[in-house]
Amino acid sequence: MRTELRIVATTAALPEIHACGGLSARRTGPHAVHLIGTAATPLGGDEFDVVVRVEPGAELVVRSVAATLALPGTATSLSFGRWHFEVGSGGVLDFDPEPMIVAGGACHHTVTTIRLASDARLRLRERVQIGRADEDGGRWRGDLIADVGDTPLLRHRLELGADTAADDALAAARALESELVYPDERPVAATGLTQARLPLAAGGSLFTRTGSLLAA
Protein backbone atom coordinates (compact mmCIF):
# COMPACT_ATOMS: atom_id res chain seq x y z
CA MET A 1 0.00 0.00 0.00
CA ARG A 2 1.16 3.51 -0.76
CA THR A 3 0.04 6.23 1.63
CA GLU A 4 0.29 9.98 1.10
CA LEU A 5 -0.62 12.64 3.65
CA ARG A 6 -0.21 16.40 3.39
CA ILE A 7 -0.98 18.86 6.19
CA VAL A 8 -0.65 22.61 5.68
CA ALA A 9 -1.12 25.17 8.46
CA THR A 10 -1.73 28.83 7.58
CA THR A 11 -2.73 31.96 9.47
CA ALA A 12 -5.86 32.40 7.36
CA ALA A 13 -7.77 29.15 7.98
CA LEU A 14 -7.90 25.81 9.77
CA PRO A 15 -5.18 23.32 8.80
CA GLU A 16 -5.63 21.78 5.35
CA ILE A 17 -5.49 17.98 5.15
CA HIS A 18 -5.11 15.87 2.00
CA ALA A 19 -4.80 12.10 2.46
CA CYS A 20 -4.93 8.80 0.61
CA GLY A 21 -3.96 5.31 1.73
CA GLY A 22 -3.63 4.02 5.28
CA LEU A 23 -3.01 7.26 7.19
CA SER A 24 -5.18 10.34 7.55
CA ALA A 25 -5.63 13.21 10.01
CA ARG A 26 -8.45 15.06 11.73
CA ARG A 27 -8.61 18.64 12.97
CA THR A 28 -8.92 18.61 16.76
CA GLY A 29 -8.45 22.32 17.45
CA PRO A 30 -7.84 25.65 15.69
CA HIS A 31 -4.13 24.80 15.39
CA ALA A 32 -4.14 21.05 16.10
CA VAL A 33 -4.53 17.80 14.17
CA HIS A 34 -4.39 14.14 15.17
CA LEU A 35 -2.99 11.44 12.89
CA ILE A 36 -5.41 8.52 12.40
CA GLY A 37 -4.72 5.11 10.89
CA THR A 38 -7.37 4.11 8.32
CA ALA A 39 -5.87 0.71 7.46
CA ALA A 40 -3.28 -1.73 8.80
CA THR A 41 -0.03 -0.03 7.82
CA PRO A 42 2.88 -0.20 7.54
CA LEU A 43 3.12 -3.80 6.45
CA GLY A 44 6.16 -5.11 4.60
CA GLY A 45 6.22 -3.54 1.15
CA ASP A 46 4.22 -0.46 2.22
CA GLU A 47 5.49 3.06 1.67
CA PHE A 48 4.15 6.29 3.06
CA ASP A 49 5.02 9.91 2.40
CA VAL A 50 3.96 12.60 4.86
CA VAL A 51 4.44 16.34 4.31
CA VAL A 52 3.75 18.80 7.13
CA ARG A 53 4.08 22.46 6.17
CA VAL A 54 3.67 25.41 8.53
CA GLU A 55 3.39 28.67 6.62
CA PRO A 56 4.98 31.90 7.94
CA GLY A 57 3.43 33.02 11.22
CA ALA A 58 1.25 29.91 11.59
CA GLU A 59 1.13 27.39 14.44
CA LEU A 60 0.51 23.65 14.34
CA VAL A 61 0.34 20.89 16.96
CA VAL A 62 0.40 17.30 15.65
CA ARG A 63 -0.49 14.27 17.77
CA SER A 64 -1.82 10.77 17.01
CA VAL A 65 -4.70 8.76 18.40
CA ALA A 66 -2.74 5.49 18.80
CA ALA A 67 0.62 3.84 18.40
CA THR A 68 1.70 2.72 14.91
CA LEU A 69 2.36 -1.01 14.44
CA ALA A 70 4.81 -2.15 11.75
CA LEU A 71 4.44 -5.79 10.69
CA PRO A 72 6.04 -7.95 7.98
CA GLY A 73 4.23 -8.52 4.70
CA THR A 74 3.83 -11.76 2.79
CA ALA A 75 6.65 -10.97 0.34
CA THR A 76 8.98 -8.75 2.39
CA SER A 77 9.49 -7.53 5.93
CA LEU A 78 10.69 -4.07 4.86
CA SER A 79 8.52 -0.94 4.87
CA PHE A 80 9.43 2.71 4.34
CA GLY A 81 8.27 6.01 5.82
CA ARG A 82 9.31 9.43 4.50
CA TRP A 83 8.46 12.48 6.60
CA HIS A 84 9.08 16.03 5.40
CA PHE A 85 8.59 19.07 7.64
CA GLU A 86 8.78 22.74 6.64
CA VAL A 87 8.32 25.64 9.06
CA GLY A 88 8.31 29.17 7.67
CA SER A 89 9.35 32.46 9.23
CA GLY A 90 7.78 32.91 12.66
CA GLY A 91 6.02 29.54 12.38
CA VAL A 92 5.70 27.04 15.24
CA LEU A 93 5.44 23.24 14.97
CA ASP A 94 5.00 20.80 17.88
CA PHE A 95 5.07 17.21 16.59
CA ASP A 96 4.67 14.43 19.17
CA PRO A 97 2.85 11.27 17.98
CA GLU A 98 2.40 7.99 19.84
CA PRO A 99 5.24 5.44 19.47
CA MET A 100 6.09 3.25 16.51
CA ILE A 101 6.09 -0.46 17.45
CA VAL A 102 8.12 -2.70 15.11
CA ALA A 103 6.91 -6.26 15.67
CA GLY A 104 6.80 -9.76 14.24
CA GLY A 105 10.22 -9.55 12.60
CA ALA A 106 9.31 -6.45 10.60
CA CYS A 107 11.92 -3.99 9.34
CA HIS A 108 10.97 -0.31 9.06
CA HIS A 109 13.12 2.47 7.63
CA THR A 110 12.23 6.11 8.27
CA VAL A 111 13.78 9.17 6.62
CA THR A 112 12.83 12.52 8.17
CA THR A 113 13.82 15.79 6.51
CA ILE A 114 13.26 19.18 8.14
CA ARG A 115 13.66 22.68 6.75
CA LEU A 116 13.29 25.63 9.13
CA ALA A 117 13.36 29.38 8.78
CA SER A 118 15.91 30.97 11.11
CA ASP A 119 13.16 32.37 13.37
CA ALA A 120 10.93 29.27 13.27
CA ARG A 121 10.28 27.14 16.34
CA LEU A 122 10.19 23.34 16.40
CA ARG A 123 9.73 20.47 18.82
CA LEU A 124 9.82 17.08 17.10
CA ARG A 125 9.62 13.95 19.23
CA GLU A 126 9.93 10.36 18.03
CA ARG A 127 9.55 7.14 20.03
CA VAL A 128 10.24 3.62 18.77
CA GLN A 129 9.88 0.22 20.44
CA ILE A 130 11.19 -3.02 18.95
CA GLY A 131 8.78 -5.88 19.65
CA ARG A 132 5.71 -6.34 21.79
CA ALA A 133 5.69 -8.17 25.13
CA ASP A 134 7.68 -11.44 25.02
CA GLU A 135 8.62 -10.84 21.38
CA ASP A 136 12.07 -10.32 19.90
CA GLY A 137 10.56 -7.96 17.34
CA GLY A 138 12.35 -6.69 14.26
CA ARG A 139 14.55 -3.86 13.13
CA TRP A 140 14.20 -0.09 12.74
CA ARG A 141 16.44 2.53 11.14
CA GLY A 142 15.86 6.27 11.33
CA ASP A 143 17.64 8.99 9.36
CA LEU A 144 17.13 12.59 10.50
CA ILE A 145 18.21 15.47 8.25
CA ALA A 146 17.52 19.04 9.39
CA ASP A 147 18.50 22.43 7.95
CA VAL A 148 17.95 26.02 9.03
CA GLY A 149 17.71 27.91 5.77
CA ASP A 150 20.77 26.79 3.80
CA THR A 151 22.70 25.89 6.97
CA PRO A 152 22.91 22.23 8.03
CA LEU A 153 21.47 21.75 11.52
CA LEU A 154 21.65 17.97 11.99
CA ARG A 155 22.58 14.73 10.22
CA HIS A 156 21.72 11.79 12.43
CA ARG A 157 21.09 8.04 12.08
CA LEU A 158 20.18 5.34 14.60
CA GLU A 159 19.36 1.64 14.27
CA LEU A 160 17.51 -0.58 16.71
CA GLY A 161 16.79 -4.27 16.96
CA ALA A 162 17.92 -7.43 15.23
CA ASP A 163 21.27 -7.70 13.44
CA THR A 164 22.81 -4.79 15.36
CA ALA A 165 26.11 -5.27 17.16
CA ALA A 166 25.45 -7.02 20.46
CA ASP A 167 28.60 -5.60 22.07
CA ASP A 168 27.55 -1.98 21.42
CA ALA A 169 25.29 -0.58 24.17
CA LEU A 170 23.60 1.87 21.78
CA ALA A 171 23.25 -0.49 18.81
CA ALA A 172 21.78 -3.25 20.98
CA ALA A 173 18.98 -1.03 22.31
CA ARG A 174 15.34 -1.95 21.59
CA ALA A 175 13.72 1.38 22.45
CA LEU A 176 14.39 4.98 21.45
CA GLU A 177 13.11 8.39 22.45
CA SER A 178 14.44 11.29 20.39
CA GLU A 179 13.50 14.98 20.61
CA LEU A 180 14.79 17.76 18.37
CA VAL A 181 14.15 21.28 19.70
CA TYR A 182 14.92 24.52 17.86
CA PRO A 183 15.84 27.03 19.13
CA ASP A 184 17.23 25.75 22.44
CA GLU A 185 20.15 27.13 24.44
CA ARG A 186 20.21 24.57 27.27
CA PRO A 187 23.67 23.11 28.01
CA VAL A 188 24.79 19.52 27.62
CA ALA A 189 23.03 17.08 29.94
CA ALA A 190 23.87 13.37 30.01
CA THR A 191 23.01 10.30 32.09
CA GLY A 192 25.44 7.43 31.52
CA LEU A 193 25.75 6.07 27.98
CA THR A 194 22.06 5.90 27.17
CA GLN A 195 20.63 9.38 27.68
CA ALA A 196 21.90 12.78 26.56
CA ARG A 197 20.81 16.21 25.41
CA LEU A 198 23.39 17.82 23.14
CA PRO A 199 23.38 21.39 21.81
CA LEU A 200 23.74 21.76 18.04
CA ALA A 201 26.26 24.10 16.43
CA ALA A 202 23.61 25.92 14.38
CA GLY A 203 21.26 26.25 17.36
CA GLY A 204 18.78 23.95 19.03
CA SER A 205 19.36 20.62 20.73
CA LEU A 206 18.93 16.88 20.25
CA PHE A 207 17.81 14.69 23.15
CA THR A 208 18.28 10.92 22.78
CA ARG A 209 17.41 8.09 25.19
CA THR A 210 17.91 4.42 24.36
CA GLY A 211 17.13 1.29 26.35
CA SER A 212 15.16 -1.94 26.38
CA LEU A 213 11.74 -0.34 26.93
CA LEU A 214 10.22 3.08 26.41
CA ALA A 215 9.68 5.11 29.55
CA ALA A 216 6.12 5.06 30.86
Image (cartoon, helix red, strand yellow):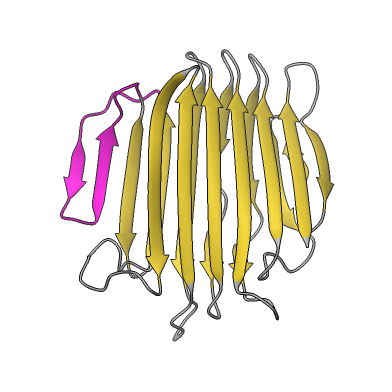
- Magenta portion: prevailing SS class: loop
Please give the name of the residue rendered at 76% of the width and 30% of the height, measured from the top-left corner. 15
- Identity of the residue furthest to the bottom in this view: 134
Q: Residue at x 15, y 55 (%)?
A: 192
Q: Is residue 35 magenta?
A: no
Q: Residue furthest front?
A: 75
Classify 64 as above or below 165: above
Tell whether 33 sits left or right of 166.
Answer: right
Q: Which residues are magenta?
A: 183-203
Q: Position of residue 164 (x, y in %)?
A: 34, 69
Q: Is residue 216 visible?
A: no
Most foreground residue, 61 or 155:
155
Q: Residue at x 38, y 43 (%)?
A: 156
Residue at (49, 13) in percent of width and height = 119
Give the x, y percent position of residue 141: 46, 58
Tell me where residue 52 sits by quadrant: top right
Quadrant of residue 166 within the rendered picture: bottom left
Quarter occupied by the C terminus = bottom left
- Check the image and report above or below for 79 versus 189: below
Quadrant of the image containing the N terminus: bottom right
Residue 140 point in image, percent of width and height? 48, 63
